[in-house]
Amino acid sequence: MASKTHVITRFAPSPTGILHIGNARTALFNWLYARHCGGTFLLRVEDTDRARSTPEAIDAIFDGLSWLGIDWDGDPIFQFARADRHREVAEELLKKGLAYKCYATPQELQEMRDKARAEGRSMTYDGRWRDRDPSEAPAGVDPVIRLKTANEGLTIIEDKVQGSVTFKNTEIDDMVLLRSDGTPTYMLSVVVDDHDMGVTQIIRGDDHLSNAGRQTQLYNAMGWTAPDFAHVPLIHGPDGAKLSKRHGALGVASYRDMGLLPEALCNYLLRLGWSHGDDEIISTEQAIEWFDLGGLNKAPARLDFAKMEYLNGHYIRHTDDGVLADHVEQLMADKGQALSEDQLARVRELMPSLKERAKTLHDLVAGIDFLIAARPIVIDEKVAKPLNQDGAREMLTELAPQLAALNHWTMESVETALRAFADARDLGFGKVAQPLRAALTGTPNAPGIFEVMVALGQAETLARIEDQAVAA
């Protein structure tokens, strides 16, 4: 029985800017497939554009992947460092007569472009140096090296998403392998690296589909087996147009700054082009168990911020309270406000209530404003009316001693005390709770009064009541 092929996938970003959300999805799909198959997931940094590749962009890629929980096997591979190997392959093809030196001048290439444009077709190199004797080379022109592409027949890609894709070889021109300055091109570098890394599956955006036909020609010329291809439709904006900057924050770091949890974003990206029945909430563990290429969709997916926030809200509600408190502490620190141990204890106490209504981590931060507010707190005019009604402040002054007499400060004890106080005065519970809530929180967005009181603690609750009694 033949042994099963060890699956090797890769993510190969160019460090010329942010880690785009579409690239993050590509990384996720490759990572999930490798983990599902018990294979290997490799990271290759395609840093051959030396003018635009920056250390900051490389760090952003590493940081974004790590934040998403996407780990890679082994050390990252840097494409630029392998330029000698890429040139070696081009020279080998040249020696075998499968590549040739092309001395076409920039002016000649421009004429080809102009002719193609006038004829309404895409520009293809016309092969004028394919069979010419190098002795005819013009003086002072440094040649490029081009692949001798098959010029008849078909190149067929059996794509795992797109199905059978056919390219006419007459429409695939002789691509450049080495530029006139000896630097390798993207097409050469990608094929050599994927072969040398043993990549068995290439999962990438369908904007690379046309490249697959050209790259297959290079695999064939070298006598190498091409990997399996899976070209996934690109992400579109909410309006159905190709995703662009005008659709909003596009980098992974921007979504983190929006207050999303990495698990929620991964779940959202997973469902943005892949499905498993009607399942919407899919944990990382389930995704690894279920992910296969058959679940990839052929139709483009649309970015939906409302659905993204819905998923994030779900994950917030199911995240440990201590973990969420740590997130809040970090976000507050990022704003230059360190929380004291007492304030952190209040945040943890109230977290079960806070997270029920939060869609982002920033909602949690907004929800603790009243918890950490300095006394006397500012009362929002939207909630001040019950507190300013005749007798309300005097009523709170009467309530304070009964609350101070409680030996145990729990949800049950404060509820019992408040209801008993209201019943003894023949008041509806709201007549007590509403002004008390205003005095303790000053905001219309606070949780229920019992949760608020327990989170604030007995001493702070009494102090805030006293502040309003003094203001009467």
Image: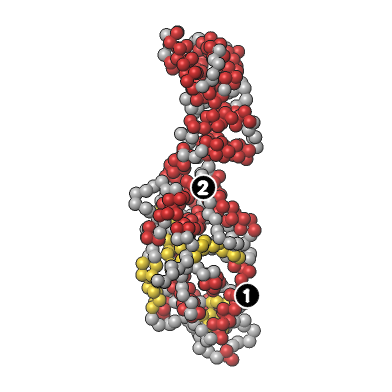
Residue 221, label in figure = none
Mark 2 burial class by Cα count in 10 Å: few <14, some 14-19, many 20+: many
User: Where is residue 379 shown, x and y percent of the image?
Assistant: 55, 22
Is residue 362 visible in the rendered image? The answer is: no
Q: What residue occupies the far left of the structure in this picture?
A: 277
Q: The disc labelled 2 sits on which kind of residue?
A: Pro
Q: The disc labelled 1 sits on which kind of residue?
A: Asp
Is residue 227 visible in the rendered image? The answer is: yes
User: Where is residue 7 shown, x and y percent of the image?
Assistant: 47, 65
Question: 395 and 316: which one is in front?
Answer: 316
Question: 134 and 260: which one is in front?
Answer: 260
User: Where is residue 409 shown, x and y percent of the image?
Assistant: 54, 20
Question: 375 and 350: which one is in front?
Answer: 350
Q: What residue occupies the far top of the structure in this picture?
A: 425
Residue at point 45%, 58% (across, down)? 36
Residue at point 55%, 39% (across, down)? 323
User: Where is residue 309 shown, x and y percent of the image?
Assistant: 45, 42
Looking at the rendered structure, the secondary structure element under dot 2 is helix
Q: Is residue 155 left or right of residue 110?
A: left
Residue 84, label in figure = 1
Residue hosting label 2: 262
